[in-house]
Amino acid sequence: MSIQSNLNIIKSSLPEHVTLVAVSKTKPVHDLMEAYEAGQRIFGENKIQEMTDKWEEMPKDIQWHMIGHVQTNKVKFMAPFVSLIHGVDSLKLLQEINKQALKNNRIIDCLLQIYIAEEESKFGLDQNELNELLSSSEFKEMKNIHILGLMGMATFTEDQNQIKKEFTHLKSIFDSLKHIDGYRKDALQCVSTISMGMSGDYKLAIECGSTMVRIGSSIFGGR
Ligand SMILES: *Cc1c(COP(=O)(O)O)cnc(C)c1O
């Protein structure tokens, strides 16, 4: 099946409140353009260099989402154009994003990545680290970032109950954000996004409250 028809099938299966990030990592510009021509404007990449190359080459009305793990020293390369950074998992990284956003005279939207999987290899904050970050004085001073919500990745498993448990956990942390004391209200006022769900588990993720799905192989084929 073509990229265009894959995209249309997925789009027609998504509720209106769910945003589709087309995960185009490792795929050539030609493939992305096929999705672009079918109307897709949000693309997700997991390497800053690759995302920057594609940004330079492609139409400027694309919103680029960084979905991978971000190294602090590379933030500066995407700060001029990145639309949403999904994988923010430390105060230090947030401070660097804030600094680079200020240099570019921008406010950069971010999601905080929460650790929900059983796999040690995955990144993210736990509930305590999240609360600590949001109530820190350093966080309160950052004027050039907006936290739009949370992101998480479930364990890579066939066990639907396990995945459901992890997504539900992320949703409950998301709901608890409203009750954290001392957070900077203006930075959190637009918290509305839960980025969870990939090709294999996005339907379950939506049932569990996802508002943003990151889908790659079901659109562009295997990598
Ligand atoms: C690659 C990737 C995806 C998309 O995975 P598919 O299974 O191809 O849909 C989603 N989220 C993250 C963080 C990824 O790295």
Image (cartoon, helix red, strand yellow):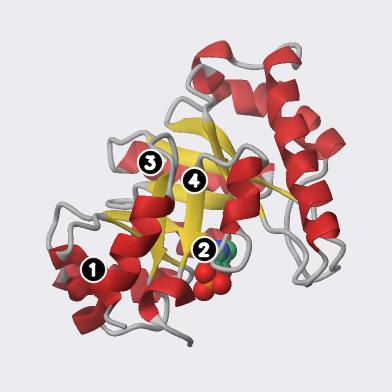
Quarter location, residue 37:
bottom left
Q: Few, some or many C-alpha atoms within 10 Å of disc 2 (few <14, some 14-19, many ≥20)?
A: few
Contact check, label 3 and label 1, Cβ < 8 Å = no
Query: Type of residue at label 3?
Result: Ala
Please name the amino acid that badge 1 sits on: Ala
Q: Quadrant of ligand 1?
A: bottom right
Q: Is residue 149 left or right of residue 45?
A: right
- Quote the CA–CA distance across marks 3 and 1: 29 Å
Amino acid type, residue under disc 2 in the picture: Asn
Upstream in sequence: badge 2 or badge 3: 2
User: Please, what is the three-letter code of the amino acid marked with disc 4?
Assistant: Met
Say which quarter of the image contains residue 34: bottom left
Of pointers 3 and 1, the one earlier in the residue sequence: 1
The residue that label 1 is drawn on is 35
Q: Are marks 4 and 2 in contact (CB under 8 Å)?
A: no
Question: Marks 4 and 3: which is nearer the front?
Answer: 4
In x, y percent, where is residue 154?
A: 73, 59
Marks 2/3 in contact by CB < 8 Å: the verdict is: no
Residue 121 coordinates in the image, percent (x, y):
79, 71
Q: Position of residue 106 (x, y in %)?
A: 31, 36
